[in-house]
Structures are given as C-alpha cells and as structure tokens.
Image (cartoon, rainbow, N blue to C red):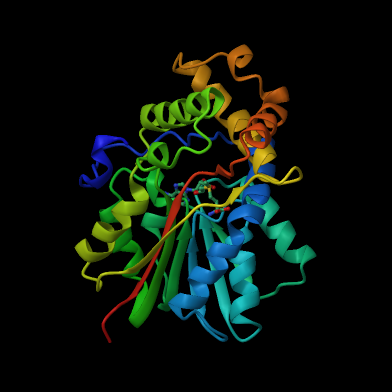
Amino acid sequence: MAKNSSNNLNTSNRDATYTLGRTSHETTRLIEQSRIYGESTKRLCKRAGIIDGMRVLEIGSGAGDVALMLAERVGPTGQVVGVDINTEILDTARQRATDAGLQNVEFIAGDARDLGFSDKFDAVVGRFVLMYMANPSEAFAKLIAHLKPGGIAAFQEPEYTLYPAFLHPDTPLMNQLITWILDVFKHSGAHLNMGIGLYQTFVNAGLPPPTMHLESPIGAAKTWAGYRYMATIFQSLLPLLEKYDLATAEQVGVDTLAARIRQEVIASKRPFFLPLHVTAYSTLPV
Ligand SMILES: C[S@@+](CC[C@H](N)C(=O)[O-])C[C@H]1O[C@@H](n2cnc3c(N)ncnc32)[C@H](O)[C@@H]1O
C-alpha cells in the first residue's frame, strides 16, 4: 500500500492538469462513468438529506450527470445550478437537460471558486472535482460559503492511495494498470488521497465530521461494463501517459485492453475492483 494514504492532504500553488483531457471521448467517458458510479452518488444525496424543493449548487458538472440526477431529486419546485470551468462540455450538459425535459437545472461556465450568488443554497454537491484543485480545503471553504445555515455539503472523490492495497485480481496486467494510473495522476498534480482527504477538507472548513463511505464497483461477469470502462479511462489518460513518458500507446494497447482485462479477470475467477472512491456528507450548524 502507498505509505502516504493516511498523510495530510497536500496543497500546491497550481491546479492539476485535468488528467483525463478535454476531448469528445472524455465527455462520452464521463457519461459511461456515471452509469457505473451513479448509484453511489444517488445514495450519497439521499443519505445526505437532499430532498424535494431544495436549491442545490453542483460543482464540476462535466457532461451534467450529477446535476441531472439532482434535478430529478429536487423536483420541479427545486432548482439546480451546475458549474464547470470547461465551457464546451456544458453544451452537452445543457442539451441533455433539454432532452430530459428538465427545466429546473441551469449550467454556468466558470471557476467554481469565483462565483457570486444573490441567494444561498440548501446543498452543495461535487463528484470527482476537488482532486484537481490546488488547495481543496480553501476551495471547499469558498463553496460552503454559498450555503444557508443547516445547509448540506455532499462530495464524492477517488481514493487512489488505497487502490494498490485492494488490487484484485493480483495479476501482471492489473499491477501495470494501477501503477500507470497512480503515476499519471501524481504527475498531473491531482490529489491521490482526495477521498480520505475529504475528512480534513470538511473539518478544516468548520463543518462537523462528515459521514463517510468507501466504495468500489467490483465484478467478474462476462458481460460486466467495468472492463470497457477501465479501457475508456486509459483512452483518456493516454495523451498524458505519453507526455510524461510513462507509457506508449503500443504498451497500453487501448483497442484490446478491455478484452485483455476481461480475459484475465475471468481466468482468475476473482472479481475486479474498479478505482475506489469515498463519499462524505455533513451539514452546517444552524
Ligand atoms: C472528472 S470530471 C467530473 C464531472 C462530473 N462531476 C461527473 O462526475 O460526471 C471533473 C470536472 O470538474 C471540472 N472542474 C475542474 N476544476 C474546476 C473548477 N475549478 N471549477 C469548476 N469546474 C471544475 C472539469 O472541467 C471537469 O468537467
């Protein structure tokens, strides 16, 4: 296991390079990712107490999956405002909201740390976004400043430092993939321990200790979507893997990767663990 899994969350002067790139492939990957991790995001929002009629700020919307789920959750009397620094991806998010007939969700382009609103929110939610921010605690403090007293903070972030300890099945291909994932996220400046780091992030901002869960989708069925999902991660990571001289396209072999993972997992008769993530929620004192 990586030794720094319990260490403090480091901060830096610079945001991470968005490790997975800003291509149309990445937009599709985010939608696919949401099919795998979406259930736990729904559980998080339910456990956190986000209900009908609430006004919710959603950070790092990407292709809009979390905002769309929240818009259904808060219903027509509620409202969701999604924010993303990537202007282009919000076109997809807006189109998906229109296609779904949701009129209670809007998307704003900008840095989530720089926004001003005239009205406060009942909840602030983010998935896989604080890990890219130079100083997550500072960013989080700015985000929860938009909450009403008693407002809810609910976040979901990956925990890569623990991933090697859960490596399963322990086969050469899996070892190689996890090494590449850890190396490329580390080089990009992302926080590898953002999942566990949510605890400090919440308490440093003055919130009560959050309720937290560690989750990982796991599977070994022949038709499981996890193999393809892992290959799509590598398609997005490939430009940085090459840029940082960590791996070549030939070594990664994206086109055959899903089939090779599937073959190894099925032969091992053991389930494959996808990247782990942590959910955390807490509420501001009234
Ligand atoms: C891994 S994606 C996750 C997207 C979405 N939350 C989901 O789970 O499907 C992270 C998103 O956060 C956005 N992001 C990163 N830093 C941001 C910031 N400072 N302000 C707003 N959005 C940011 C990125 O542009 C990207 O779309």
Location of the N terminus by quadrant is: top left
Residue 270: image quadrant is: top right
Compared to residue 20, the image places residue 55 above or below, namely below
User: In the depicted view, which residue is nearer to us: 186 or 159?
Assistant: 159
**Count of number-bearing discs:** 0
Question: Residue 26 vs residue 1: left or right?
Answer: right
Compared to residue 23, the image places residue 111 above or below, namely below
Compared to residue 47, the image places residue 25 above or below, namely above
Which residue is found at the position 37% from the left and 31% from the top?
A: 186
Which residue is found at the position 41% from the left and 31% from the top?
A: 182
Q: Is residue 253 visible?
A: yes
User: In the depicted view, which residue is nearer to us: 248 or 16?
Assistant: 248
Question: Residue 25 vs residue 54: left or right?
Answer: right
Question: Measured from the top left, where is residue 225 in percent x and y?
Answer: 70, 46
Which residue is found at the position 48% from the left and 34% from the top?
A: 19
Residue 74: image quadrant is: bottom right
Question: Measured from the top left, where is residue 110 in percent x and y?
Answer: 48, 52
Location of the C terminus by quadrant is: bottom left
Question: Measured from the top left, where is residue 180 in percent x and y?
Answer: 47, 25
Residue 2: image quadrant is: top left
Which residue is found at the position 54% from the left and 44% from the top?
A: 274
User: In the depicted view, which residue is nearer to us: 54 or 214?
Assistant: 214
